[in-house]
Image (cartoon, rainbow, N blue to C red):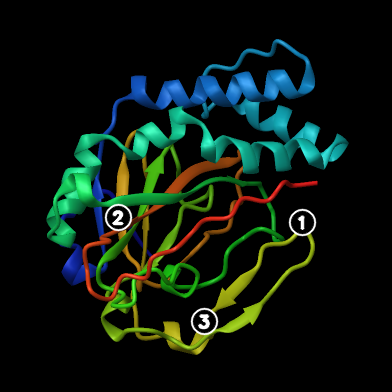
Amino acid sequence: MIIFSKKETNLKKNGFSYYPKLLTRIEINKFFKSTLDSLNFYNGEKKRFKNFDDIKLSNYILKQKKRNNKFINYLYNSLPHFSSLINLFENQKIRNIASKILNEQPSNLIICEHQFRIDYPKDTNFILKAHQDSSFYQQDGSKKQSLVCNISLHNITAKMGSTILYKNSHSKGNFSYSKKFSHSKNQSTQRQIKEKELDNFKEITIETKPGDVSFYDMNLIHRSGKNISKKIRFSIIARIFNPLHKKFRAFQKISKIIK
């Protein structure tokens, strides 16, 4: 596996692009404050942590997870809707890069399907197997007018399970997959691509710092790395669509109350 660390802008060729320090720590810290406010509100406490890198934060969440898993569900399902998270993706730098890739005006792009991920040390239930986001998000019928955007919230190393990308895999179009739907809140639904399909592509992982931003082609195969560290890997992700394209499929997002 190759550890990637330099700026890369040729998404069309590689299937991904990477922009170090695109966002500032001040911008990241606004979302960190929302995260801290949320966990303190839910647990009725006044905990203080430095940032997402603070090992004490990881230890606290791991401890709370054992006590009350509803707390984790609250974070997963509430934080993606906070303005402090959404505003990170609405940064004009991100819109301008996506605009250049998709050849559409920045203000016309739809940025949605936000996610907040917590990848625990030694976890196997929530690790995402090799997949293409295009199999989950089918708003783009062409598969060429949409992107995945990943913002790094802290220092992430390969040992923490940094995302593994399969270079150039986007150029082969859609791969068949086996669908494994989980009815359990303790396991992630998978649309897994067979291992033998991965042999023709180089594995790349990007070790990131706060404010680094990566873009993936919707057809790029990628998966979660294994977190063999003692710290949680936090990340936020969104999808970007060009709605002014003849193969765009209009959609309505329906929210459900998590019981």
Residue beneath the point at 72% across and 43% down = 73
- Amino acid under disc 2: Phe
Could you say which is closer to the camera, residue 166 or residue 160? Answer: 166
Residue 139 location (% of width, % of height) = 39, 68
Residue beneath the point at 49% across and 43% down = 235
Q: Badge 3: few (under 14), some or many (20 or more) residues near its Cα, within 10 Å?
A: some
Residue 43 occupies quadrant: top right
Q: Secondary structure at mark 1?
A: loop
Q: Earlier in the sequence, mark 3 or mark 1?
A: 1
Q: Which residue is mark 1?
A: 185
Against 153, residue 29 (above or below) is: above
Residue 86 location (% of width, % of height) = 42, 36
**Residue 246 has which mark?**
none
**Residue 193 has which mark?**
3
- Amino acid under disc 3: Ile
Against 220, residue 21 (above or below) is: above
Q: Which residue is mark 2?
A: 215
- Amino acid under disc 1: Lys
Q: Badge 1: few (under 14), some or many (20 or more) residues near its Cα, within 10 Å?
A: few
Residue 58 location (% of width, % of height) = 65, 32
Q: Count the marks.
A: 3
Q: Is residue 129 visible?
A: yes
Q: Is residue 150 left or right of residue 225?
A: left
Q: Earlier in the sequence, mark 3 or mark 2?
A: 3
Query: Marks 3/2: CA distance?
Result: 21 Å
Q: Is residue 209 visible?
A: no
Query: Marks 2/1: CA distance?
Result: 28 Å
